[in-house]
Every structure is written in structure tokens, then in C-alpha cells.
Image: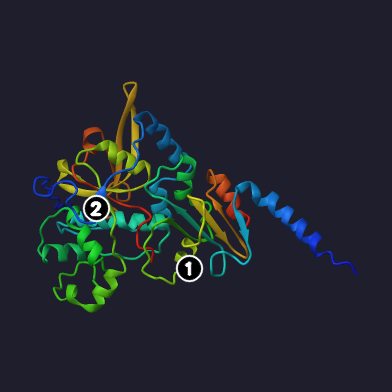
Amino acid sequence: MTDKRPLWVLVIACALFFAFGGKGGAIFTPPPIDGEGLHVLVVYESSDALPKGQRAILNSNSWKEGAQWRILDKDSHFNDETSIWKKALDRPSEHLPRVIVSNKGGFEGPLPADIPAMDALVGEYR
Amino acid sequence: MNRAKGYIPRNYKRQPLGSIPYTTAFNLPAISKSEWPDLIDYKKEKKARLIDVINAAELPVLDQDGFPFCWAYGYVTNLRVARAKAGIPYRHLNPHAIACIRTGYRKRGGNTFDLPKLMAEFGCPTYDVWPKYSMDRSLAKSDAVKRDAIQYRHTEHYELDPNDFEQKAVSLLNDIAVTAGYSHMSHMMCDIELIYKKSGGGYTFGTKHLNSWGAGYKDNGVGQFYGRKAVSFDQLAIKVGTVNPI
């Protein structure tokens, strides 16, 4: 019997590329943030000026519904070194501002440009 | 509603800019005044103002209940907003406690710039260990209070130039609330939003503030000033996102 796994891998890789490649990030299995359910972490430099669309994401409530979430400066101090958010914040990344979405897999990459794009990204993992 | 105040303006001869520990000079990039109305409108249209965060987090309005501790209530209101913006679970941080510690339990006024050192090295206890308006002198030495307070320490603040409305506007446009001392009412409050109204072919800018006179003040604790009344003398911002994320 022919082993078709390489073909399946290629098909899945192509699907993932078209689904997420345009966002410039990477997808993950297992999820990049520990814990059950939808988790979202936004990391930014609070002393940098953000474009207004990205700035609005920080205060928008639409993508936060049903999620555990944090919006943290890249240099945030933690009282609890074992916090799942500290582990997530410490993940190496070339992007800033960036977002990690995690729930049975996940996405890590640049923060979307505006609220609708953020809603769509988080919606993929609900 | 008890309109207690207690704001004592900072003496910049004795405490010049740069002399307060745990504060840094405000350094966010300037934003041209001509862009302010568009940025204000955009946040409002997208429901992406600090007040939207505050409402979603259901932050209770504080009430200083006759004590002259507005300078501590204005600080803690600011810290509560910063924590809500970061998504950090709500805790009943008690401004009365840090005012008691800072004044040696005296019912006297002060300034929010009295607090960065205390907040960085001691922190702020919650109602769990320091009952709301307690003047119990044993509390500050209690191990339970110290253990609780240190979890909510905060070390990073921006020091804005006195009376500099443009710096305050830039801070607010970046969603960083400002604890502001208003000389015209001898009172400190937490400014949360830049606003404007059209007047004579131009714009008059102002600010919305969260007061600490309970929910009976203005619109559920939120008031506003325009023009010269919106200019505040002392101005301290809590660096959003650097709040201890517990």
C-alpha cells in the first residue's frame, strides 16, 4: 500500500498557508498558551505610538468576549513567575506589536491592522 | 455626595521635575492638534475608548467619603483603569490605606506625586485586609497587609510637565489615563478621555474625568471640563501595560 502521508501533509500545509500565511504569522499545535479554552495575548511597547486601527484593538471589547485575555507591555513585570501569561510573553518573536491566539492550536504573529481583522483572527479559534 | 477634596499642589522648587523616584519624563511622540478630532471620533465610533474598557470591566466608582484623600483616590482610580485595560482581574485596591500610610493616619491633603515611592516599595492593600475607611494604626505593620499590598505594587509612572495640556492630550490619545490636579477646585481626579466641541469655526478641547465622589457625581461618576478648566497643574500617568500582571 502506498504511503500517502506526504500528500496529506502538503495539502494541510497549503491550506494553512492560504488561511494564515497572509497574516505573516505562524500556526501552532499544541496551543501556544497553556490552559483550556480561548486565550489571547497582545504584546506591545506602550511608549510607542500605534496606528489608530491597532490602538483601537486594545480597547475594543468585541474580540475579548468569551476569551481569557491580556494586553501587556513587552517589558511587563510579573509577581508570579509561573504565570501562563509570563510564559507566553517570553516566547521569542520577531513581531511587535504581536498577538498570540490559543485554543486547540493557535496563531502567533503581528497584531492585525484593525478591529474587524482582529475579530476575524480570534474568531477562527472560537 | 460628600465633596471632600484635599489636593495640595506640588512645590516644583522643592521637588523639581525628575526628582520623584519611580517616575520618568513623559516621552510619547507628539500628535499634531489638527489630528486630535479625527482620533477622538475614530475611538468613539469604534467603541474603543477607555470608558468602554471601564464599562466592560464594571469598575465601581470610588467614594472618598469626606476624607481629604483625593490624591490617593485619583492614583488608585488610574491604577484600576490600567489594570482593566491590561485584562488583569479586578481587585478592590484601597486608596484610603495608602493615604493613611503616607500621612501617618492624619486627615490631611496631599499630592499624587507623594505616592510612587510608596506604591513601588510597599504596594497597595485591598479591602480584604484593610477595611474600606479604617484608621486602625496597627494595619500598616500587619504581615497580612504587607503580603497583600506587595502583590499590587507599581513601579513605572510618567511625570508630565505642569499645566501642559498637549502632553496630557497625547497621553489620553494613547489611552494612558492621567491623575490630574485641578487648582480651580483644589481636587485631584483621574482623566480618562480627550474630548472636543466645535466653537467659532475651530475646536475647544477638554477632558473627561473619573471622580471619587461616588456614582452620584455627574454621569455615574464621570464629569468633564473644556478649555482652561481642563488644564491641570500636576499630572501623573501610570505606564499602561507595565502594571504587575497578577
Residue B127 at least partly seen: no
Total marks shown come to 2
Is B28 above or below relative to A15? above
Give left or right: position of B104 versus B177. Answer: left
Q: Residues within 10 Å of mark 1 (few under 14, many from 20)?
A: some
Q: Secondary structure at mark 1?
A: helix
Q: Position of residue A15 (x, y in %)?
A: 73, 53
Residue at (20%, 49%) from the top-left corner? B188
Q: Are marks 2 and 1 on the same chain?
A: no
Give left or right: position of A67 versus B59. Answer: right
Q: Which amino acid is tagged 2? A: Thr
Residue at (22%, 58%) from the top-left corner? B116
Q: Which amino acid is tagged 1? A: Ile
Q: To which residue does mark 1 refer?
A: A84
Front-most of B194 and B173? Answer: B173
Q: Position of residue B75 (x, y in %)?
A: 25, 55
Q: To which residue does mark 2 refer?
A: B23
Furthest toward the right, the residue is A1
Q: Position of residue B175 (x, y in %)?
A: 37, 46
